[in-house]
């Protein structure tokens, strides 16, 4: 599921943000620090075919604090807590919320003189194949105009959001971690060239390329085209995988339309999705399965504080004994009740040729961000 609390929209944004006012002393650095967080309620209800319903309702709150820069260094800390309000069956809450309290941010940031920043510790990240919170070292830089660079190493990872909280920061790649480098280059105002590389020594080596073009067809009608390909090579070479994704979008007034096609090769995607992705579906259970081929259509509407979205797609994939088809329908609605207070509802209906894998789920979130 997409992130429900206001977090990091894109890893490169922080590198381009101006540095906060520098403190003259350590006391001033702490006194002039910034506080952020959220208070929210979340409920989810699931129903599998020929099975009982399950679900839970929870409340959560987070508090994050970062000092003002002192000699270009700032300290950040954040804690997240969740409590169970109701669950339909024993274990429903704990299946998704593995920990009631977690320190999800604990980092030291060095802000460069106009070139970017270096962050070490527990931090949020949002790259093409690496999401949620990681413990590691991330460097963000803008060495020349039009070029943004993100590179680093992540040794542990945790999911922390309304719908899922990890028990702790788990080791990545058998404690060897994940190395990554991501370039975003804009040679033209309408074009972004995004080569990247992910290296997990015991799992995969994955170079990829993403191209995004945003342009206007006629007055009032805007378009976007995205194409991406990644190859994931495994140490043995037996389970090497490829993944291709093409998407076309159109926007007119308050409406937006999107359509896309995704394809995994006959052996899957080589594990590149192990630490995160950017899929368009709420569920998307089999889009990375062996020989998976997926198409989808989406429609969005935005009017003042109201947003509505619908997406339908079909995936055909190889289950060994033959090809299987899975259909998915997503319906989403969001509304800003007051400043920083949002409510969001999401419905997903999954229909698989194997009836045991068919289900529907509905979630409702109310969040105040500060």
Image: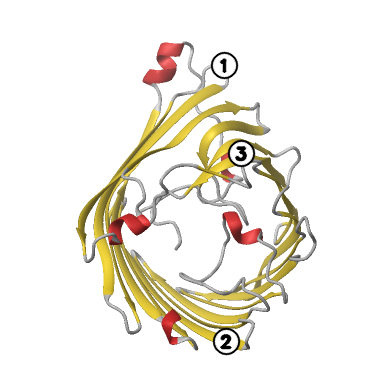
Q: Where 72 sits versus 58, above or below? A: above
Task: Tell me residue 180's x, y (percent).
Answer: 69, 46
Task: Name the residue nearer the viewer: 78 or 68.
Answer: 78
Left or right placement of residue 135 versus residue 330 in this view: right
The N terminus: image quadrant: bottom left
At label 2, counting other C-alpha atoms closer than 10 Å, the crowd grade (few under 14, some 14-19, many 20 or more) is some
Q: Looking at the rendering, which quadrant does residue 216 occupy?
A: bottom right
Q: Secondary structure at mark 2?
A: strand
Q: Earlier in the sequence, mark 3 or mark 2?
A: 3
Residue 295's place in the image compared with 151, above or below, is: below
Which residue bears the numbered disc 2? 324
Work out how far the residue at label 3 is from the one at label 1, CA to CA, in angstroms: 18 Å
- Of the two numbered discs 2 and 1 on the same chain, state the one appearing first in sequence: 1
Find out whether the residues at labels 3 and 2 contact each other: C-beta distance under 8 Å. Answer: no
Mark nearest the camera among 2 and 1 is 2
Residue holding disc 3: 15
Is the residue marked by circle 3 packed among few (<14), some (14-19), or many (20+) residues within 10 Å?
many
């Amino acid at each position: 599921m997409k992130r429900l609390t206001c977090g990091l929209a894109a890893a490169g944004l922080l590198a381009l943000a101006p540095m906060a006012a520098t403190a003259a002393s350590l006391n001033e650095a702490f006194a002039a620090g910034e506080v952020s967080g959220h208070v929210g309620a979340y409920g989810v209800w699931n129903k599998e075919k020929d099975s009982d319903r399950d679900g839970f309702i929870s409340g959560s709150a987070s508090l994050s604090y970062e000092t003002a820069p002192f000699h270009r260094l700032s300290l950040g800390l954040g804690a997240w807590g969740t409590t169970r309000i109701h669950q339909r069956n024993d274990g429903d809450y704990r299946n998704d919320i593995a920990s009631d309290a977690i320190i999800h941010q604990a980092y030291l940031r060095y802000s460069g003189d106009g070139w970017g920043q270096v962050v070490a510790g527990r931090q949020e990240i949002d790259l093409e194949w690496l999401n949620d919170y990681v413990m590691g070292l991330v460097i963000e830089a803008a060495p020349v105009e039009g070029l943004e660079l993100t590179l680093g190493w992540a040794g542990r990872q945790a999911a922390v959001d309304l719908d899922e909280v990890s028990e702790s920061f788990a080791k990545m790649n058998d404690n060897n971690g994940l190395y990554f480098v991501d370039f975003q280059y804009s040679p033209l105002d309408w074009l972004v060239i995004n080569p990247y590389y992910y290296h997990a020594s015991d799992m995969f080596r994955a170079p990829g390329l993403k191209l995004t073009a945003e342009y206007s067809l006629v007055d009032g009608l805007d378009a976007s085209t995205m194409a991406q390909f990644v190859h994931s090579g495994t140490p043995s070479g037996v389970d090497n995988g490829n993944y291709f994704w093409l998407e076309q979008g159109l926007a007119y007034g308050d409406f937006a339309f999107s359509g896309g096609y995704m394809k995994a090769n006959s052996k899957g995607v080589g594990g590149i999705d192990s630490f995160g992705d950017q899929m368009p579906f709420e569920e998307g259970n089999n889009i990375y399965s062996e020989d998976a081929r997926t198409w989808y259509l989406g429609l969005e509407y935005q009017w003042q504080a109201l947003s509505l979205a619908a997406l339908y797609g079909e995936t055909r994939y190889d289950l060994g004994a033959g090809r299987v088809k899975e259909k998915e329908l997503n319906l989403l609605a969001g509304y800003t009740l007051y400043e920083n207070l949002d409510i969001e509802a999401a419905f997903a209906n999954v229909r698989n040729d194997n009836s045991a894998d068919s289900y529907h789920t509905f979630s409702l979130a109310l969040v105040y961000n500060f």
